[in-house]
């Protein structure tokens, strides 16, 4: 459940579109009759046609991936006997395929090596309570803003194959997709498995 203040409604509706949502169901209180009605997002929000933007300048959007990851994680976290989760394998397969075929935003940070005058940009890493290090990946600008809040940082756009290469040669334990929302974590073995299954 999300409680939206009036000034947050517009950005919330835009985020719904990035999740692949195309309509909203409004439900009146029982005291007002309990009436329900649907409104298409496009009825009151105008979205740009990103296909008209040159490929190199298009914003990163992964609505299909976002939705498939949310469905998968919702089923994983649903309190039920594993035997009842009959479509879990199918949801995992769909989320994995979408993950491997997507582009991501990766935040960068300035790093200055000892003895060097100029700083260099390096991939930002996140550390968990077990001192394991992860590369954070974001499916779109809205997800990055949830994580970075007001702090502006340089970002790189990377395909999954490039990220899989980073994992082979780097010190990261794995990746974490959208750490501020669905928080999907994959270790090195999981990343390598997706690359082999869907990109080779």
Image: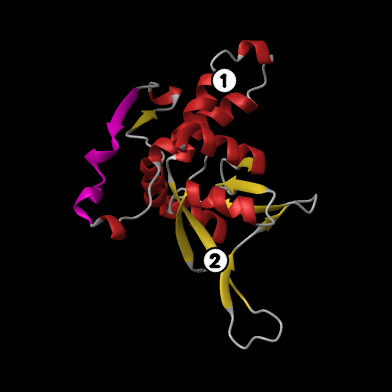
Answer whether residue 125 is visible to the viewer in this image: yes
Residue located beneath label 2 in the image? 108
Left-right relation of 170 to 145: right
153 in magenta: no
Q: In which quarter of the image is residue 189?
A: top right
Whole-percent x and y of residue 167? 61, 51
Of the pair 70 and 44, the residue shown nearer to us: 70
Q: Residue furthest left?
A: 52
As drawn, 110 above or below 90: below
What colour scheme has been applied to the protein in the rendered image?
A: secondary structure
Q: Does the magenta stretch include residue 52?
A: yes
Residue at figure coordinates x 53%, y 35% from the top left = 196
Q: Which residue lies under the disc numbered 1?
A: 88
The magenta segment:
36-53
Please name the residue shown 69% across and 14% down the image. 81
In the rendered image, the vertical position of residue 183 relative to residue 132, given as above or below: above
Task: Residue at the far right: name it.
Answer: 130
Looking at the rendered structure, the secondary structure element under dot 2 is: strand
Residues at circles 1 and 2 in contact by the CB criterion of under 8 Å: no
x, y percent for residue 172: 67, 54
Q: Tell me, yes or no, if residue 137 can be seen here.
A: no
Residue 161 percent across, percent down from the top left: 49, 47
**51 over 184 or under it: above or below:** below
Q: How far apart are marks 1 and 2 (CA)?
A: 34 Å
Q: How crowded is mark 1: few (under 14 residues within 10 Å), some or many (20 or more)?
A: some
List x then y, in percent, for residue 34: 40, 21
Q: Earlier in the sequence, mark 1 or mark 2?
A: 1
Q: Residue at x 60, y 62 (%)?
A: 124
Closest to the observer, 74 or 99: 99
Image-based side of 148 in relation to 5, left or right? right
């Amino acid at each position: 459940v999300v409680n939206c203040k009036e000034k947050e409604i517009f950005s919330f509706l835009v985020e719904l579109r990035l999740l692949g949502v195309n309509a909203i169901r409004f439900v009146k209180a029982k005291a007002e009759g309990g009436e329900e009605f649907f409104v298409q997002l496009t009825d009151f929000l105008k979205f740009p046609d990103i296909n008209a933007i040159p490929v190199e300048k298009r914003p990163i959007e992964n609505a299909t991936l976002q939705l498939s990851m949310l469905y998968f994680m919702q089923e994983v976290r649903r309190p039920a006997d594993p035997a009842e989760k009959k479509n879990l394998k199918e949801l995992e397969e769909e989320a994995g395929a979408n993950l491997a075929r997507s582009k991501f935003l990766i935040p960068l940070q300035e790093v200055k090596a000892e003895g060097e005058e100029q700083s260099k940009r390096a991939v930002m890493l996140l550390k968990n309570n077990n001192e394991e290090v992860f590369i954070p990946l974001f499916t779109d600008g809205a997800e990055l803003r949830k994580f970075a809040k007001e702090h502006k940082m340089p970002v790189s756009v990377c395909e999954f194959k490039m990220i899989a290469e980073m994992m082979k040669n780097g010190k990261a334990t794995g990746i974490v997709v959208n750490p501020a929302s669905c928080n999907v974590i994959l270790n090195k073995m999981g990343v390598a498995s997706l690359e082999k299954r869907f990109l080779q």
